[in-house]
Image: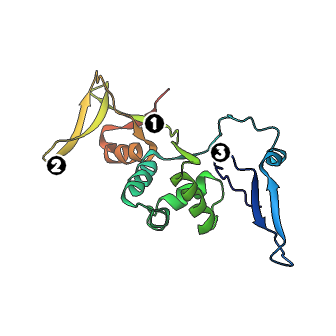
Amino acid sequence: MTKYVIDLPEGVKFIVGKRYVMLSEKELLRIPVENLQEYIAPTVAENAPVEKRVIELPADVIEGVQNAKIYWENVAGFVLNAPSIVFPEIRKSIDEPKASYDKVADILGSWYFGNIEFVPKKEPKFYVRVDVDGEEQSVAMWQNSDGESGIAFDVFMRNEPAYKEAEADRLVAGLTALNARKVKVEE
């Protein structure tokens, strides 16, 4: 069943429409506006806030979806050109790994119109630490404006960077000579 919300101008007394199966052109459906109240669910308060469905996605996927929405001015272009990583991530988030393209497209369309909210998934974060001369040190990857990058070690790092698990695993694998290990960030 499809439901529609129609704003009516002041003073309208009847809504006139055709029946589903018409026997003649004279057979019109006239519904008094005052009777429409009986079709409104009694449990819905007039100004009740609408609860949006919330779907958790990785923060970088949400950023990609938001960028795609800015670029595409219509929902069809947006859904057809959404970043390819969005579809498997939505399927994982709704626990339906084989959800149809149409179902995922409906979710994207609902998000586009503000009926669904995407929130960042709470993924565990990890510090990477190494032992240098018997002293535990934090590890930070860096990159400057010239594109040069490297790894820094510090005993008293003020803003120790936290990494996603896959990033921390790659960093630890690259620092095996220093007995690197990952340590879960306690929130």
Badge 3 marks a residue whose secondary structure is loop
Badge 1 marks a residue whose secondary structure is strand
Image colouring: rainbow
Whichever of callouts 2 and 1 sits on the residue coming sooner in the sequence is 1
Residue that appears at 45% across and 66% down: 77
Label 2 sits on residue: 147
x and y percentages locating residue 136 in the rendered image? 33, 26
Task: Tell me if label 3 and label 2 are in contact, CB under 8 Å.
Answer: no
Say left or right for 37 vs 52.
Answer: right
Within 10 Å of disc 1 (Cα), the crowding (few <14, some 14-19, many 20+) is some
Badge 2 marks a residue whose secondary structure is loop
Within 10 Å of disc 2 (Cα), the crowding (few <14, some 14-19, many 20+) is few
Label 1 sits on residue: 125
Label 3 sits on residue: 10
Residue that appears at 43% across and 42% down: 164
Say left or right for 121 vs 67.
Answer: right
Mark 1–mark 3 Cα distance, whole angstroms, equals 57 Å
From the viewer's perspective, is the residue at label 3 or at label 2 nearer? Answer: 3
Picture layout, residue 70 above or below residue 155: below
Within 10 Å of disc 3 (Cα), the crowding (few <14, some 14-19, many 20+) is few
Q: Nearer the viewer, residue 72 or 153?
A: 72
